[in-house]
Amino acid sequence: MRIDTVLTNARITTLDPARPTASAIGILGGRVVGLDEELDGVAADVRHDLGGAPVVPGFNDAHLHFSVLGREMTQLDLSAEAAPSLDALYRRVGEWAAAQPEGAWVIGNGYDQNKIGEHPTRQALDRIAGGRPVYLVHASNHMAVASTEAFRLAGHPDPDALEAPPGGSVVRVDGVATGLLQEQAMALVSHVLRPVPQDDLVAALGAASAWALRNGLTSATEPGIGGRMIGHGPADARAFQAARERGVLRTRITAMPFVDALHGLGRVDEGLEGWGLDLGIRTGLGDEWFRLGPVKIMSDGSLIGRTAAMCCDYADTPGNAGFLQTEAATLHEAIVSSHENGWQVATHAIGDRALDVVLDAYEEAQRRAPRADARHRIEHVGVASDEQVARIVAAGLVPVPQGRFLSALGDGILAALGAERTELAYRMRSFVEAGVELPGSTDAPVVPGEPILSIHDMVNRRSAGGAPIAPGEALTAHQALRAYTVGSAHAVFEETRKGTLGRGMLADLVVLSDDLLAVAPERIREVQVRATMVGGVFGHDAEGELTRT
């Protein structure tokens, strides 16, 4: 028998309970066909000696805005690393604007008022941008600041007279609009930036794929395409297909259509009013490279932006408990209708008040139309009580918390919640010990998306300033690795083909510089990706060319 590739002299963690470890792996047609002694006497077109390097299944991010990540690579970086103060932010915006053609949009991403002291203002942007339209997106992606010219081009010549839409806020000081738009109010300006040209979006997907391969990320779930608030335009899925056809999409993507891309379909069955995409298309359509996942629904906003809907006021902003983006009844009906029409549902819920509304809707959906293993998801679960954790477990839901938030945003989380309520933030161990198959994710580019750094944070749970963030919720390295492989595949019904390295599984794997399961917990972040294979092909090799024998 002859196969395509054999990797030898490796320390393979398969995560397959039938054979947890191996030293050799055989690949044919992009899938694993054998391990160790199963390869005796088998010839291969290519053999790679990995020199004893550790190998794990390919990392899989269950909540990563893949196309947005690629787009931001071409835009102005306003993260705290690039602009550590408000003055530095203004300097970067002014310098970037001066280098752009007259009238060109200045789009920046990633600023965080928790780190630079306050939000930028439209009045300051007007002074420094030379009259160009400016739109600066907050690190959370739940708010943005626009210049006066940006408002004018969006059809609002007098920002001070703007009324906020339901589920949004136009921030004013003494009756004067500061330019800060929260949640649904972002669409007052962002609508003129859509649709993104298809070629630009394809290029973004190519850039994101190259980044993913360098970091060992072989699969990701994009939480929202095709919507007015989340997505780049009505033909987002087409861009993913085009990127794959052109050979630039080299990461496997499961994409969530945003809820406002769905619509009524009329009567589709006895007693069933259709709700979804045309032709009744729903979760699961596609192949191993690009497929449709859950429908994405928003309930509330951002924790660090103080817009997530809480049961009580934020610790540092008395009188503010956040708000729902959608009226509870409307949110409830969207969840129930999606469930009745066969969709897997993924609802963003960060605040504990929003979480109760979402849990009520999921429970009502199952009462109306019982469905085994619907595997509905709750994105983020930023704050959850013991009672809410128990409800999530009992309902068979998939919580999707972000480990990377703990370091990148942890100090802001502490300020927002206070020490006592921070113990309820981004819980992980509670779910795992209750038997939940927890996924791993980052929500990049809200925070940096490198999987190894995220695994480090899931284990260590400390803020950038060194403060512990609910340390009782820390995972072991093995639990965190499982989340980033098996857990993320399970979260979108793909555990039968990815997440482990057993026979018949996709040959997606990562070669590492050290063993994630053996290094000291505080050193996990130091482990490097040496090579990344997707579908039996090495798409990244940090050392130039793997040794052949």
Image (spheres, grey):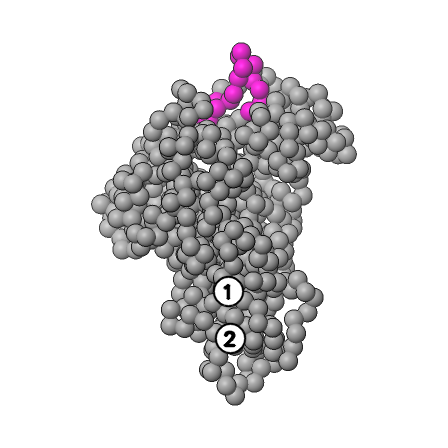
**What secondary structure do most residues of the magenta stretch adopt?**
strand
Residue at the spot 35% in from the left edge and 45% down from the top edge:
338
Vertical order, 282 against 381 (above or below): below
- The three-letter amino acid code for the residue at tag 2 is Ser
Q: Name, please, the residue furthest toward the top.
A: 174
> Is residue 12 rendered to the left or right of residue 122?
left
In x, y percent, where is residue 392? 30, 45
The residue nearer to you, when weighing 284 against 24, is 24
The range drawn in magenta is: 164-180
The residue nearer to you, when weighing 187 against 46, is 46
In x, y percent, where is residue 323? 40, 28
Q: Name, please, the residue furthest toward the front.
A: 520
Q: Quadrant of residue 322?
A: top left
Q: Residues within 10 Å of mark 2 (few under 14, many from 20)?
A: some
Task: Judge whether residue 166 is colored magenta.
Answer: yes
List the residue tagged with mark 1.
56
> Is residue 382 rendered to the left or right of residue 149?
left
SS category of the residue bearing label 1: strand
In x, y percent, where is residue 336? 30, 42
Task: Judge whether residue 231 is colored magenta.
Answer: no
List the residue tagged with mark 2.
23
In x, y percent, where is residue 473? 39, 46
The residue nearer to you, when weighing 43 against 344, is 43
- The three-letter amino acid code for the residue at tag 1 is Val
Q: Name, please, the residue furthest toward the left.
A: 367
Q: Is residue 244 visible?
A: no
First in sequence, mark 2 or 1: give its number. Answer: 2
In which quadrant is the C terminus drawn?
Answer: bottom right
